[in-house]
Amino acid sequence: MIIDINQHKISIGSHYDIFIDGEKKYYGKQKLFKLFAEVNLFAETTNEQAFKVKKKFFLLYPTYVLTDSQGKEAILEMKSYWKTHYQCTYQHKVYDIYAHRGRKCSVFINGKQVAWWDKQAVSWFDGDNYQIIADDDINEQVLIACCLAYDNYTYKSQDKGVFNYDLGNLVFQNRSFDKQWKPNNKNK
């Protein structure tokens, strides 16, 4: 599965268009005038809220509450600042997100890699763009919500101009990026 997340910055917020295998399936909107960031993910066809991503107050490490359409919550929190490791538990599955050198992140569920994403290096006028490569049987909504939270914390204060360039992580990493990993494509 290929998920494309395209952010459009507006003067006081963001809007996201989200495509699954080339078809627009979701869109996201950042709530305005909030003390702590909040992004809502909606299904394109029904306009129903699929997930809410809300930043919480934190002292050391960023924390986000991810809430699905049934009200089930997951907490996404940073485990290591220097080696950029995030962790989220949702429905008895532990999602670990590791940033690598550059702009790539890998996603593991219960210790097994299930996805990775890459942020586009250059953007003109608009915000950030991500491409996620994932197993076909992964919960795409949780993966998208984690990516939106990661983007909100990591790049919130950047991308202010007409031309934006991101070098990515230049120093530490918890794990090396696995170039050999391939997603399972059960639907193909």
Image (cartoon, grey):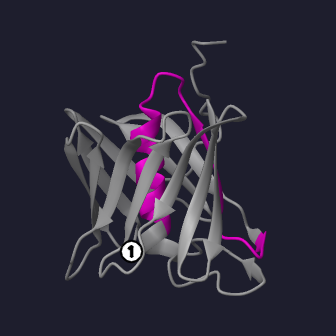
Looking at the rendered structure, the kind of residue marked 1 is Trp
Within 10 Å of disc 1 (Cα), the crowding (few <14, some 14-19, many 20+) is few
Quarter of the image holding residue 180? top right
Q: Is residue 127 magenta?
A: yes
**What's the residue at 39%, 44% (across, down)?**
49
Quarter of the image holding residue 98? bottom left
Viewport quadrant of the C terminus: top right
* Above-or-below relation of 70 to 58: above
Residue 27: where, in percent of width, then height? Answer: 55, 49
Q: Callout 1: helix, strand or loop? A: loop
Image-based side of 128 in relation to 81, left or right: right
- Magenta part of the chain: 123-151
**What's the residue at 53%, 82% (across, down)?**
12
Closest to the observer, 87 or 176: 87
| Residue 43 seen in render | yes
Viewport quadrant of the N terminus: top right
Residue 26: where, in percent of width, then height? Answer: 55, 42
